[in-house]
């Protein structure tokens, strides 16, 4: 039963990588992965909230009465999300502009609440930290990968730099919402095929 | 009963702690955020319009009341004289309002430059209004008080190919800017005069400080 810290960290990277394996947190996954920067920025912001809330929830797990645990978790999560929002406005303003409403929406991201409820409220601080970090990094990687594919085909750029040269006609379907669904579906399919072997 | 009290206490302490933390963080970042907003949203367009200006137009600004709204005007100084102003207007685009920074020279009533500040146009299509310098360059030198229309609507504006709605939005925003300018021109020239007087007076102080 007792798992090591490394195991808890590693499971978030493949076995339980949020958008692909758990199919959680799809709202930001589909909405902000127009470019790789946005995807990774969103992932890092979510990771910060996830790690901080996991630590605090786990540290307070014996103090918080179980009847009001969800309310308490939401207070903790909302606090850290607001911290992220203010820090992003102050230091990485362009990123804040492109992520827009999806930063405050991390509050209702089911990955964050899900980890608080399913993991941090039952495990120690060190394990919860590893779990939060693992899931967060997995989420960041997934959003980065999705963002990279959509940016390369949808805008013909990678990290803002042109890939195909000026004559490339962007496949703008990829940066619209349906493109996100198709791209996510294809990546899910590839991951499932790889998992079968 | 004891459980009830515990619930209330825990939630109260958590909320109070969270409120205190956020309030202090907000105070700490307030000035930085305001500066960042001006720098990243309006700054690039303003600096582009006032290329070669000797001052920092983001710092040298004044406000004029126009009905219910207060408009900000940014001043561009050339050879020490504050003689060009830039202000913002909006036009309806494909993905919402397009913010335009319009620079104008009040002595000739001609546009000195146009830049897009905020927009949510389709990336790669309408977003070229912001990224393609040739598109906004066509407005420089045109008289300010003029109705702008894209060529397809019988006007004079070269539309971005595939982004007619965006081009129409930009044209409408410019036409609107013209009417704002017409309405506020007496106040603008007055403020500019005030500003050039003040500039002479404070010059000594600035050099010492």
Image: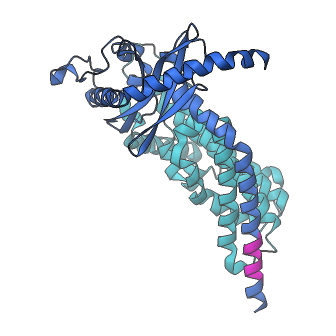
Chain colours: A cyan, B blue
Kindly give the residue lying farthest to the left in the view shown. Answer: B154
The quadrant where residue B81 appears: top right
Q: Position of residue A179 (x, y in %)?
A: 40, 39
How many numbered marks does the figure carry?
A: 0
Q: Residue at x 56, y 6 (%)?
A: B79
Q: Depth check: give the residue in front, A93 or A145.
A: A93
The stretch drawn in magenta includes residue B12: yes
Q: Position of residue A36 (x, y in %)?
A: 56, 33
Q: Residue at x 72, y 78 (%)?
A: A66
Is residue A8 left or right of A163 when viewed as pictured?
right
Instruction: Give the main secondary structure of the magenta stretch.
Output: helix
The quadrant where residue B1 appears: bottom right
Is residue A154 left or right of B92 when viewed as pictured?
right
Q: Is residue A86 visible?
A: yes
The stretch drawn in magenta includes residue A103: no
Q: Position of residue A163 (x, y in %)?
A: 50, 18
Kindly give the residue lying farthest to the top in the view shown. Answer: B79
Q: Residue at x 74, y 74 (%)?
A: B12
The quadrant where residue A50 appears: bottom right
Q: Depth check: give the residue in front, B178 or A127.
A: B178
Up the image or down, A43 lies above or below B199; here it is below
Q: Depth check: give the residue in front, B46 or A13.
A: B46
Q: Please state, as top left, top right, bottom left or bottom right, where the C terminus of chain B lies in the image.
A: top right
Q: Is residue A156 visible?
A: no
Kindly give the residue lying farthest to the bottom in the view shown. Answer: B1
Up the image or down, B36 lies above or below A80; here it is above
Q: Position of residue A136 (x, y in %)?
A: 68, 48
Q: Depth check: give the residue in front, B90 or B81.
A: B81
Highlighted magenta segment, given as a residue range = B6-13
């Amino acid at each position: 039963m007792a798992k090591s810290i490394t195991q808890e960290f590693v499971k978030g990277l493949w076995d339980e990588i949020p958008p692909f394996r758990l199919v959680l947190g799809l709202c930001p996954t589909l909405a902000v992965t127009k470019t790789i920067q946005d995807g990774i920025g969103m992932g890092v912001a979510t990771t910060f909230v996830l790690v901080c809330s996991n630590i605090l929830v786990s540290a307070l797990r014996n103090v918080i009465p179980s009847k009001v645990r969800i309310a308490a978790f939401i207070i903790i999560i909302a606090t850290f999300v607001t911290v992220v929002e203010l820090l992003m406005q102050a230091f990485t303003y362009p990123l804040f502009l492109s992520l827009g409403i999806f930063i405050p929406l991390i509050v209702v991201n089911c990955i964050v609440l899900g980890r608080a409820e399913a993991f941090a409220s039952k495990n120690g601080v060190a394990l919860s930290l590893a779990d939060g970090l693992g899931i967060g990094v997995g989420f960041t990687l997934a959003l980065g990968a999705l963002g990279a594919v959509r940016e390369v085909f949808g805008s013909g750029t990678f990290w803002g730099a042109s890939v195909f040269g000026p004559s490339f006609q962007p496949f703008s379907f990829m940066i619209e919402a349906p493109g996100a669904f198709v791209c996510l579906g294809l990546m899910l399919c590839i991951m499932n095929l790889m998992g079968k072997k | 009963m004891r459980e009830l009290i515990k619930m209330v206490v825990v939630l109260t302490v958590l909320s109070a702690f969270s409120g205190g933390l956020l309030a202090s963080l907000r105070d700490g970042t307030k000035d930085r955020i305001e500066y960042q907003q001006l720098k990243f949203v309006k700054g690039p367009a303003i600096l582009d319009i006032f290329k070669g200006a000797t001052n920092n137009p983001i710092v040298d600004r004044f406000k004029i009341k126009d009905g219910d709204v207060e408009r900000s005007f940014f001043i561009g100084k050339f050879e020490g004289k504050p003689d060009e102003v830039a202000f913002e207007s909006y036009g309806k685009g494909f993905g919402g309002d397009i913010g335009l920074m319009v620079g104008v020279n009040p002595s000739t009533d001609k546009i000195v430059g146009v830049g897009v500040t905020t927009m949510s146009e389709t990336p790669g299509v309408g977003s070229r209004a912001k990224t393609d310098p040739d598109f906004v360059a066509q407005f420089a030198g045109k008289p300010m008080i003029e109705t702008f229309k894209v060529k397809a609507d019988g006007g004079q504006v070269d539309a971005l190919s595939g982004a007619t709605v965006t081009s129409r939005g930009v044209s409408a925003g410019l036409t609107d800017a013209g009417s704002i300018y017409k309405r506020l021109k007496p106040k603008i020239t007055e403020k500019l005069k005030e500003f050039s007087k003040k500039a002479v007076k404070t010059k000594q102080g600035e050099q010492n400080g």
